[in-house]
Each structure stands twice: as structure tokens, then as C-alpha cells.
């Protein structure tokens, strides 16, 4: 028999206890109803793939064979493919669409998805199960990001986090740097990255003097929405004003001008690029030398460049994600947590037992070492603790993953992590931020290429696209779309 949208609490007494627990802020653990003589089977949906999925599944199996066996809990994990595939599966289950699966007991979720599900009343309040002392062991910002329920109730439990860094093909950078005098210090700011990217385009163009305007892009970025969120904060402007779950747009023209000049202009000029699904793909084909992306993606950074005419090994450098010159040192905090579907107290307790176990430093470090995500407790984010667990458990870790985690723990301690707050229509606003400028750049790049192919000089073709008038037109249209998305 298909389960209902979410399992209902069976008795008025239990409902009263849960309500009282919420009002008291979850100030104590509930009496355990778990027993190996009455086991409970749980399902968890996630979006992990490759090494991340393998590591997660390994830990689930270890839990089942240890604490799960002792307490009568058995967890089965399912990958739903991508983040968007997982969101679709959750929304279909929530809406009880024909053919949809029942809601799982737990699922990986970003704040925007959780916001909608929480509003439907389908999630357990985890504040009822964790004491303040327990939560004190976790990085405070990670816990606060999950407090999206009424009166700050904890709805998303942190299990793994990431931020953004810059990854650089050091081998080909060294060749370029030796030829032009470009310095790594220039890559600390977005303006410096633009200057280096222009120089790289001109240098690569000069290598084939008989073929004009065939320079190559230097840099790209994943997650353009993050560029808007963090770029605005770096420039001293909060992009969104959120009141009572509704957002209004802070569209300071000078801030948006900076964002335009340091993304769109170098994109249509050919200095920045975006070709494959992810920018690490573009480094692999030699179409880019550097990109800004998630720390959880570093395991996909290529060990060599491979294309139709060339194949050579490359080394890498992990660098800070560039910020605006003179701006605040703000970078994104991201990574889905796990939410628990509202059911009965026994099932919810079982889910919480798994979350407690999974986020213990010795277990969370295993996941981080295999996935590239940062652990979520204060203890596990001490480098000596992380390295000790890796040594004690004899973990085999991709060197680039280890370097990235070390870099985040040691070299980024003076950065402020920023996570956008949730609000009604948050997904719609993020979609405009992600695609509103990048899609325009892609369309204009195509139009510019066609005009150049027809025989017009690129410099002449490019002028109207990077003019003040072009910015004004885009600014008006883009900010209007943002406001409409927030209000729809």
C-alpha cells in the first residue's frame, strides 16, 4: 500500500508532547522508543554520485552494522541523480502526483526546497530532538542556516558543507606567466582576473598571427547566482531585503554595473568562457585555465588536458575565490543538509540517531575525505583532528581533495561565509540570477561570432554590446525580472 504524503502522529498525547517540546525550544532528548526487537526501516534520498555516493553508501552500511543493529534501525539510501532530479522527486511526492513515490524518511535538501516542504507541514522539527548543548558542537553558521521553521525551528540538519575556491591549471599558467609576466597575486581580485584574462586572450591570439581574433578564454565560473549574492555583499550591498518571508530587490545601479563589467563584458569579449556542463570540463579540454567553483567539485579537476590536437599532464593550484578589489571578504556557504519527514516519534528518533552518528567527527571526516565536503562540527574542522582521523582510519584520499580541505580550514579562516536566506519564490529569484545574465551572454557571443564570421572586425562588432546603453537596457530588464520573480 502506498504511504500517504507523510505519516501522521498517532495520538493526541504525542501531539501535545511534541507541541510542548517545540515551545520549549527542544531543551531535552525524548525517551527513546527504539528497540532491536522492533526494528524500523528508513529510506534516505540524496543527489550524490561517483565517489560521493560510494562514500555515503559505505557509511550507511557501517551504521546499519553497528549503531543501527544495536538500536533496531536499518537505513536504505537512494541516489536520485542530480539536485534538480531530487527536487522534482520530492515535489512530486509532496503533491502526490500519479506514479510518484512516497516521501522518504529523510532527504538531502537545500534551503529553497526545504522552505516549500516545511510550509506544507511535512517536516519534523529537529529542535525537538537536539539539545542546545548538542548543537553547540556544530559550526554555528551551519546550524543557523537550517533554522527556517517557525520561531527559528531547526528543519535542516547540517551533514556536509562547501564553499567556493579558484582552481588553476598551474602547468599552462607557468608557460603563460613566463611569457607575459602575469602574477598569481593578480588573481586575488575579480578586476585582476579580468586583466589577466584579457592578457591571456591577447597572448594566445598572438601565437597564430595569420588567424585574427582566435584568442582563448582564461577563466570561467560555476553558479552565476552565487556571483550575484556574494559579489553584492563584497561591494557592501545586500541583494535581497527579506521581511515576513517576502523579498524585495536592492538593485543599486553602481553595484550592478560592477557585476556586469566583471562578468558579462569579459564573457562577450572572449576573455571568460563557459563551454561544457561544468567549468572543470572546460579545463580538461584546454578551453580554460582557471575557474571558480564548489570545493566539493575539486575531485573532478582533470589531471591532464585532452582535446583533438593535444594531450598533456597538468598540475594544479588551489586559490581563494577572487573578490572585488577593496571589497569585503565574503564567500558563499552552501551544501545541502538532511531533513526528516514528519511521521511518528519512533521513526523520527531513528532518523535523528542516524544524523547524530553520521556527523560524529570520525564519521563525518570519512565522508569529507571521500566527497570533498567540509565536516560540520567544530572539532572535525580542526586540521589536526581531520588529519588524525584520516591517519587512524587509513583513508585513501584524492590529493587534490585533501589539499582543498586543508586550504579551506587553514587559509580561509578570515573570510565571512554567506548563505542566502529563504523566502517565498526564492527558487524563482535564484533562477533569474543564475540564467538572466549568463544566457544573455551566450546569445550575444553567438551573434558576435556570426558577425565576425561574416567579415566584420571583432572590435567593431563588440562596441554596442559593451556600451553604456547596453548596460542600461540590461539593468532595467534584469531588475524588473528579479522583482517580478520575487513577487509572483
Image (cartoon, rainbow, N blue to C red):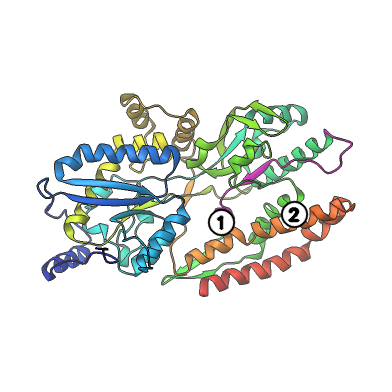
Q: In this view, does 104 lie above or below 398?
A: below
**Rendered image quadrant of residue 244:** bottom left
- Residue 216 in the magenta stretch? The answer is yes
Q: Locate residue 254, reporting x and y percent.
A: 67, 62
Which quadrant holds the N terminus? bottom left
Residue tagged 2: 445
Give the extent of the magenta segment.
Answer: 207-231
The tag on residue 316 is: none
Residue tagged 1: 225
Q: In this view, does 208 lie above or below 130?
A: above
Among all residues in the image, which is located at the extreme left?
37
Q: Earlier in the sequence, mark 2 or mark 1?
A: 1
**Rendered image quadrant of residue 448:** bottom right
Q: In this view, does 301 lie above or below 338?
A: above
Asked if the residues shown at circle 2 and circle 1 are in contact, with their CB atoms under 8 angstroms apart, the answer is: no
Q: How many residues crowd around disc 1 within 10 Å: few (fewer than 14), some, or many (20 or more)?
A: some
The number of numbered discs placed on residues in the rendered structure image is 2
Amino acid at each position: 500500500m502506498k504511504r500517504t504524503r507523510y505519516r501522521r502522529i498517532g495520538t493526541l498525547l504525542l501531539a501535545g508532547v511534541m507541541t510542548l517540546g517545540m515551545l520549549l525550544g527542544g531543551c531535552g532528548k525524548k525517551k527513546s522508543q527504539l528497540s532491536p526487537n522492533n526494528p524500523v526501516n528508513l529510506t534516505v534520498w540524496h543527489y550524490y554520485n561517483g565517489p560521493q555516493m560510494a562514500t555515503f553508501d559505505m557509511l550507511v552500511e557501517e551504521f546499519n552494522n553497528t549503531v543501527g543493529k544495536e538500536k533496531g534501525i536499518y537505513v536504505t539510501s537512494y541516489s536520485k541523480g542530480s539536485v534538480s532530479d531530487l527536487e522534482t522527486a520530492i515535489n512530486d511526492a509532496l503533491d502526490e502526483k500519479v506514479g510518484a513515490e512516497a516521501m522518504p524518511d529523510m532527504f538531502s535538501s537545500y534551503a529553497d526546497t526545504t522552505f516549500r516542504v516545511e510550509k506544507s507541514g511535512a517536516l519534523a522539527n529537529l529542535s525537538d530532538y537536539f539539545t542546545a548543548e548538542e548543537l553547540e558542537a556544530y559550526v554555528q553558521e551551519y546550524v543557523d542556516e537550517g533554522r527556517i521553521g517557525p520561531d527559528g525551528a531547526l528543519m535542516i540538519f547540517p551533514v556536509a558543507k562547501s564553499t567556493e575556491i579558484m582552481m588553476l591549471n598551474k602547468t599552462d599558467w607557468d608557460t603563460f606567466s613566463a611569457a607575459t609576466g602575469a602574477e598569481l597575486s593578480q588573481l586575488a581580485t575579480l578586476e585582476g582576473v579580468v586583466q589577466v584574462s584579457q592578457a591571456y586572450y591577447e597572448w594566445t591570439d598572438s601565437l597564430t598571427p595569420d588567424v585574427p581574433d582566435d584568442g582563448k578564454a582564461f577563466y570561467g565560473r560555476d553558479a552565476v547566482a552565487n556571483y550575484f549574492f556574494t559579489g553584492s555583499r563584497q561591494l557592501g550591498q545586500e541583494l535581497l531585503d527579506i521581511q515576513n518571508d517576502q523579498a524585495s530587490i536592492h538593485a543599486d545601479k553602481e553595484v550592478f554595473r560592477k557585476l556586469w563589467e566583471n562578468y558579462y563584458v569579459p564573457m562577450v569579449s572572449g576573455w571568460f568562457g563557459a563551454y561544457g556542463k561544468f567549468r572543470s570540463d572546460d579545463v580538461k579540454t584546454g578551453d580554460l585555465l582557471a575557474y571558480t567553483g564548489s570545493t566539493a567539485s575539486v575531485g573532478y579537476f582533470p589531471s591532464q588536458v585532452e582535446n583533438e590536437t593535444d594531450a598533456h599532464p597538468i598540475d594544479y593550484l588551489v586559490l581563494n575565490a577572487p573578490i572585488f578589489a577593496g571589497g569585503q571578504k565574503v564567500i558563499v556557504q552552501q551544501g545541502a543538509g538532511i531533513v526528516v519527514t514528519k511521521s511518528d516519534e519512533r521513526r523520527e528518533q531513528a532518523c535523528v540517531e542516524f544524523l547524530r552518528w553520521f556527523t560524529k567527527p570520525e564519521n563525518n571526516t570519512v565522508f569529507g575525505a571521500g566527497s570533498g565536503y567540509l565536516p560540520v562540527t567544530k572539532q572535525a574542522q580542526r586540521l589536526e583532528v581531520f588529519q588524525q582521523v584520516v591517519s587512524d582510519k587509513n583513508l585513501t584520499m584524492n590529493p587534490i581533495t585533501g589539499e582543498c580541505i586543508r586550504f579551506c580550514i587553514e587559509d580561509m579562516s578570515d573570510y565571512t561565509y554567506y548563505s542566502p536566506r529563504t523566502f517565498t519564490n526564492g527558487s524563482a529569484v535564484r533562477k533569474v540570477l543564475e540564467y538572466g545574465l549568463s544566457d544573455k551572454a551566450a546569445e550575444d557571443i553567438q551573434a558576435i561570432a556570426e558577425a565576425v564570421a561574416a567579415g566584420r572586425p571583432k572590435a567593431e562588432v563588440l562596441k554596442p554590446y559593451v556600451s553604456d546603453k547596453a548596460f542600461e537596457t540590461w539593468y532595467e530588464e534584469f531588475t524588473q525580472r528579479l522583482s517580478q520573480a520575487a513577487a509572483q
